[in-house]
Structure formats: structure tokens, C-alpha cells
Image: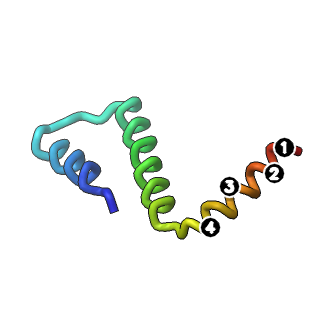
Amino acid sequence: MLITPIVALAVSSLFEDDHWSVFSTLGLSLGLSLVITGNLLAQLKPETLVLVYNKLKTAIKK
């Protein structure tokens, strides 16, 4: 899993006395969700991705 940037951000915020704002928290949440989504997509079998893609394609055409 690609959690190294998240761990590095947490450690640096502790040692550098970083203060979190609403915008930085929202940015972290977006980044975290993108990392988790990417990890899940990377672990799926190609056949599963093709199946989901075809279902989405037919649903959009309707």
C-alpha cells in the first residue's frame, strides 16, 4: 500500500509543529480517499475491472 506519504505528513506535522486548518484537513481527506481508491483498484483482477466497465458503459447508454 502507498501510505508512506501519509505517514510522512503525520510525522512532519508532529515534529515541525504544523497547525491544521479546515482546508488542509479537507485536502488530507481528499488525498487519503484517492490513495485508498487507487490501492483498491490496483488489487482488483483485470477481469473484474472489465466487467464493471462494461456494466457502467451499458448503464450510461440507457
**Residue at the (40%, 30%) spot, across then down:** 23
- Quickly name the residue at label 2: 58
Q: Secondary structure at mark 2?
A: helix
Could you say where residue 16 lies in the image, as x and y percent from the top left?
Answer: 11, 39
* Mark with earlier residue (1, 3): 3
- Quickly name the residue at label 3: 53
Q: Residues within 10 Å of mark 1 (few under 14, many from 20)?
A: few
Residue 59 falls left or right of residue 26? right
In space, the residues marked 1 and 3 are separated at their CA atoms by: 12 Å
Q: Amino acid at mark 2?
A: Thr
* Mark with earlier residue (2, 3): 3
The residue at the far right in this view is 62
Q: Residues within 10 Å of mark 3 (few under 14, many from 20)?
A: few
* Mark with earlier residue (4, 3): 4
Q: Amino acid at mark 4?
A: Thr
Q: Secondary structure at mark 3?
A: helix
- Quickly name the residue at label 1: 61
- Quickly name the residue at label 4: 48
In space, the residues marked 4 and 1 are separated at their CA atoms by: 20 Å
